[in-house]
Image: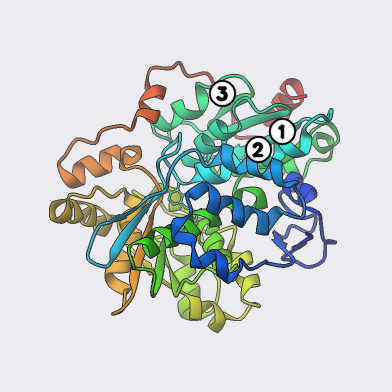
Amino acid sequence: MKYYSTNRTAPPAGLKQAVTESLAPDRGLYMPETIGRLPDSFFETIERKNFREIGLAVARTLFGGDIPGDELETIVEGTLSFDTPVVPVGENIYSLELFHGPTAAFKDVGARFMARMLSHFTAGGSDSITVLVATSGDTGSAVANGFLGVENIQVVVLYPRGKVSDLQEKQFTTLGQNIRALEIDGTFDDCQRLVKTAFLDPELAGRLTLTSANSINVARLLPQSFYYFHAYAQLKKIGREDGVVFSVPSGNFGNLTAGLLAKRMGLPVKRFISANNRNDVFLDYLRTGVYSPRPSVETVANAMDVGDPSNFARILDLYGNITDRVRSDITGYSYTDEQIKSCIGKVYDETGYMLDPHGACGYMALAEGLNDGETGVFLETAHPAKFRETVEEATGRPVELPESLKAFAGREKRSVSLGKDYPGFREWCLANLV
Ligand SMILES: *Cc1c(COP(=O)(O)O)cnc(C)c1O
């Protein structure tokens, strides 16, 4: 399978190139040239299949031409070692819990899959790959844990000093082995700028193979379609598969894009909702037809504090750059911090279900936008314990840490402090990375 660039000037790339480069040379995002459809027979019996069987069938459709069957099976089995259950919250509203992985957020699926795919492409060779990742919290932890111990790959996590929670910081500064953490005296945007500048630096490019592990990378993005199929299977089992609407708490829109791809692969989804916090440039786009990125603002759902979503280009591309076609599949809603907190409290009081601030946006969008005859599923993208303070304040209840996160609490932080200027970062790379 070839992957083309959304900017359409770079030549199409093979999977290995798309995965190791992340971004196409013309700065566009890679997209699969053809999106295969799963056969009707697959959907006829999908309710009897487990997550791994479903994941493997979808992975074969996406990557079967590029990775031998048994290896793809190993990659999928290694990735999907935890469940993504669908849990009822309201009468027609279900939570798709994506937080049962090692770092308790949905990014575990894509990060673990990407680590295994990269390792497949570098196995036996002498090339080592350096993954640079800027994080405001969740991405760094998922990528660091996903890549831990993977041969021929080193990971450098850049994070803004004092701007990630202690627990998040522990998840990427305590691992050792092939994972290193740089504590940058600046903001998340500074971290991101350092990473972007490094990718364009010819001397670094001459010495290191650099790649990124955010959702611009197809190996992280595409596997996120697995759990949409698995959610549908679970709904079909209980006879609720008609008129399914997925509500996706969105930041860089990788998760939503994976859902749109699942629909193209034949998943019988009626439509999607993009749920946002106050960073709602996508909603503005849906309303006006004009895309105007703007600086992000801080909210309690901080994994969605994105002012210029990187996967916007992919969504446009999927709909032939025609806004009305985008609108026919996706509607949008956005919420303030006050609305998010009061929703968490209210849903807990009424149902006993504890939402995290991101899932709360997804839930509210369904409560507001679901029509008669539809079944709503919001993606619960993180465990509420990851946003403990907000959730405890909103519910008045203590939040118990999941076992996977408790393990990090007692470990010792190891990170290197750096300024936000590029020359210092570059010097560190040249001295410390090989
Ligand atoms: C990353 C993240 C999001 C946003 O996902 P995108 O794919 O960037 O849209 C939402 N919620 C949580 C908890 C996240 O970590």
Asked whether 125 or 47 is in front, the reply is 47
Residue 37 against residue 416 in the figure, above or below: below
- Specify the quadrant of the image occupied by residue 151: top right
Is 203 located above or below residue 258 in the figure? above
Q: Residue type at mark 2?
A: Arg
Type of residue at label 1?
Thr
Please state if 27 lies on the left or on the right of 96 as rendered: right
Q: CA distance from mark 2 to mark 3?
A: 30 Å
Mark with earlier residue (1, 3)? 1
Which secondary structure lies at badge 2?
A: helix
Question: Looking at the rendering, in which quadrant would you find the N terminus?
Answer: bottom right
> Closer to us: mark 2 or mark 3?
2
Residue at the location (34% across, 48% down)?
Answer: 300
The mark lying in front, picked from 1 and 3, is 1
Can you see residue 191?
no
* Residue nearest the observer in this picture, 227 or 299: 227
Rounded to the nearest angstrom, the CA distance separating label 1 from label 3 is 19 Å
For mark 2, what is the residue?
A: 116
- Which badge, 2 or 3, comes first in the chain's sequence? 2
Q: Earlier in the sequence, mark 1 or mark 2?
A: 2
